[in-house]
Image (spheres, rainbow, N blue to C red):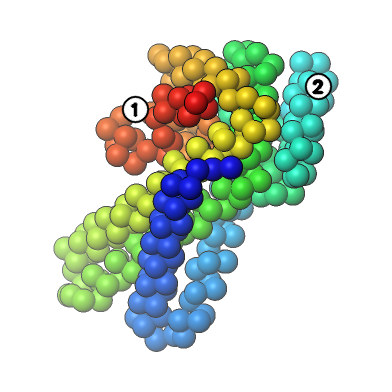
Amino acid sequence: MTDFGLKVRMVVVGAILFAFYVGAATVLALMFGVDPLLILPAGIIILPAFQYKLGKWLATRKAEEMPDEGQYREVHQMTESLSRDMGVKKPKLMVMEMGVPNAFAVGRKGAGVVCVSTELMQLLERDELEGVIAHEIAHIKNRDVITMVVGQSIGMMVGYVAYFAVLMGGERNIGTYILAMVASTLANMLVMVFVLAISRYREYVADDDARQYIGSGDPLARALEKISSGSQGRESQVEDSMNALCIFNSDKSLMAQLFATHPPTEKRIEKLRS
């Protein structure tokens, strides 16, 4: 069970994002003289569906399906057991070289994929890997990938509104186009602040779910410690667009801190052991 304060923050942020979405859809409809009821379904179904399919393909295109034999047999068995306990269909397991120990989940309940890096497999003990797998299955169970995709779609819509608003409000010249692009980027970034806030909250929820289903938070806490130290001095081969999906984001640049996809690892470890 997540704590009450976390639930409240997620509801508030979700309501703000929904308000952004309704406002953007209404303005777009007024700009182009169409019924807002046509724009609303398109924004909440068609655009996210396209982004979902494309994102899933991009995330897994360099991965290979995990064989059900040898060192991987036990991973399949623990995933089967965890999926049964968590009430979801066993996700497809894949393995990929990421440059750093890491893992991510994509897809939805019934069509999920959990991908682990070869570096992670070499680094973690069995119970630590079980904690990571449970965390990723929790993301699928809680529909976190779909939540992020919808949030990103809202950001795109708000960006389009800002772009066309500037473009249609002045003379069509190179300066107006540049100003429209800047306005679009800033508007999108404003929405993404709230989207990434949800992303950080969802990490705590997935950590807590994993703790419940494996019976203790310590294995996942140890896994996060090893992943964090094992990533130091190594360059991640994971694309920036996939950082929000991974269990650990090693990017410590100033921009990454301002628009963090994950809460601080130290805080996650502390909550897991509290």
Query: Circle 1 — which element?
Result: loop
Would you name the residue on which mark 1 appears?
252
State the residue lying farthest toward the right: 69
Number of marks in picture: 2
Relative to 253, is 60 above or below? Answer: below
Marks 1 & 2, CB-CB < 8 Å contact: no
Relative to 176, is 59 above or below? Answer: above
Residue drawn at (64%, 33%) of the image: 212
Residue 121 on image: x %, y %: 64, 18
Relative to 107, is 271 above or below? Answer: above
Query: Residue flagged by tag 1: what amino acid is it?
Result: Lys
In this rendered view, identify the residue nearer to me: 142 or 244: 142
Q: Quadrant of the N terminus?
A: top right
Residue 110 on image: x %, y %: 74, 49
Residue drawn at (79%, 38%) of the image: 84
Residue 139 on image: x %, y %: 60, 42
Would you name the residue on which mark 2 appears?
73
Per the rendering, the mark at residue 172 is none
In this rendered view, identify the residue nearer to me: 222 or 181: 222
266 with respect to 48 (left or right): left
Within-10-Å neighbours for mark 2: few <14, some 14–19, many 20+: few
Residue drawn at (20%, 61%) of the image: 179
210 with respect to 176 (left or right): right
Where on the picture, by quarter, is residue 24?
bottom left
Residue drawn at (74%, 33%) of the image: 82
In this rendered view, identify the residue nearer to me: 38 or 2: 2
Within-10-Å neighbours for mark 1: few <14, some 14–19, many 20+: few
Query: Residue flagged by tag 2: what amino acid is it?
Result: Arg
